Image: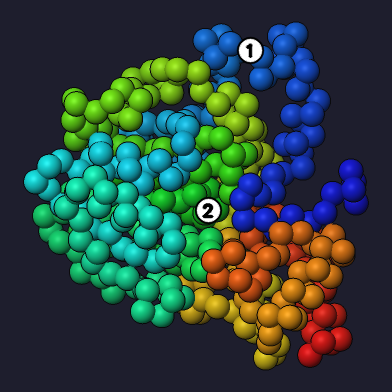
Amino acid sequence: MKYNRIYNFNAGPAALPLSVLEEVKESFLNFAGSGMSITEISHRSKTFDEVINDAVLRTKRLLKLDDRYHVLFLQGGASLQFAMVPMNCLPDGKSADYVETGTWSTKAIKEAQILGKNINIVASSKDKNFSYIPYDVKFNNESTYVHITSNNTIKGTQWARFPDTKGIPIVADMSSDIMSRVFDPKPFGIIYAGAQKNIGPAGVCMVIIREDMLKLIPDNLPTMLKYTTFSNSNSLYNTPPSFSIYIIQLVLKWLEETIGGIDKIEAINKEKAGLLYQTIDSGDFYKATAKQDSRSLMNVTFRLPSEELEAKFIQEATKNGLGGLKGHRSVGGCRASIYNATNMEGIRALTDFMKNFEQKNG
């Protein structure tokens, strides 16, 4: 393999396109003829303006966002958004609906409750260990927003279709599947995503927020916890994570110009997941943990007949250049995270290994 790289199935920080990494390598010491590294240039410079503005424009083109949407780059990861969303957009005396589909939605609920906000857990898949998406949900007409987690990295579930909230703004944590499939952005008031899974490295969270949601923000929040602080300054109120934003820009450029857009990457992602699930479903040796209508195209979770075999599978896979296949520590098992940057070559290498492993150990 070039550069002795393995096939990377880590859940995050996760694989990045090799061409992006090569471009970073080539420009790292002298970025855009500046004589400085991207990590050294001023965030107030014209050079960095071009980086962040291009990242914003590419995001809007790829997701087909209209002028009502602001694209922000914040620190603190998606986990900070669990608190920032209700702090900014859930006024006192109002309520919001939350759908609980796993660890990250549970944490979002907890943060809102810590703040003393009035929230309704309108649906949960906890009864079956978060192995499915509860599609039949009745929302409260008076709710300010509906919060969902579009894809669950730990349990391997994903909303195949987004809920009809009858006009209530959807707030979605899309950390692990943003830019992976086509969807209509109009029902969404806020989309947030930690970059380190599907669009970049760790250190920055993309927040897409609609103008009407900004109008909900109270005046008495600390400056750094207000979305308007960043929407009014093009995310440059203070020094941003410039290197992480730069790589996001390159990933979006790769997605737009090399891949050809969201519709093209969606087709590739369906093909990748289809081959992997087909391998899992072909016998009784491997067992997918998510219900079939809720299976993720990004995080494929599965079990083997015993924990001993799972440990052996992960160990031998690693020796064969297949990394990051250990399931989350909270659930065990195996997990292949197959984000946009994971190519079909890697999927074929994994499925070939899985078939050989089954033949030897089944």
Q: Which residue is depicted at the point 74% across and 55% down?
A: 8
Q: Nearer the viewer, residue 93 or 341?
A: 93
Does residue 131 lie above or below 196 as drawn? below
In the rendered view, does 155 fall on the left or right side of 25? left
Of callouts 1 and 2, the N-terminal one = 1
Q: Residue 41 bears which disc, if any? A: 1
Image location (x, y in percent) of residue 80: 40, 41
**Image coords of residue 11 (percent x, y):** 62, 56
182 and 247: which one is in front? 247
Describe residue 209's horizontal placement relative to residue 27 as left or right: left
The residue pinned by badge 2 equals 176
Instruction: Give the quadrant of the C terminus.
Output: bottom right
In the displayed structure image, the side of residue 263 where residue 84 appears, left or right: left
Describe the element under mark 2 as helix, strand or loop: loop
170 with respect to 266 (left or right)? left
Q: What residue type is labelled 1?
A: Ile
| Element type at mark 1 | loop
Within 10 Å of the Cα at label 2, are there few (<14), some (14-19), or many (20+) other Cα atoms?
Answer: many
**Alpha carbon separation for disc pair 1 and 2:** 30 Å
**In the rendered image, is residue 218 in sight?**
yes
Tell me the quarter of the picture where residue 288 sits.
Answer: bottom right
Answer above or below: position of 142 versus 39: below
Q: Which residue lies at the image location 86% right of the left edge and 86% below the top edge?
A: 360
* Residue 308, percent from left and from top: 73, 81
Residue density around tag 1, few if under 14, some if 14–19, many if 20 or more, within 10 Å: some
Q: Which residue is drawn at 25% across and 32% down?
A: 214
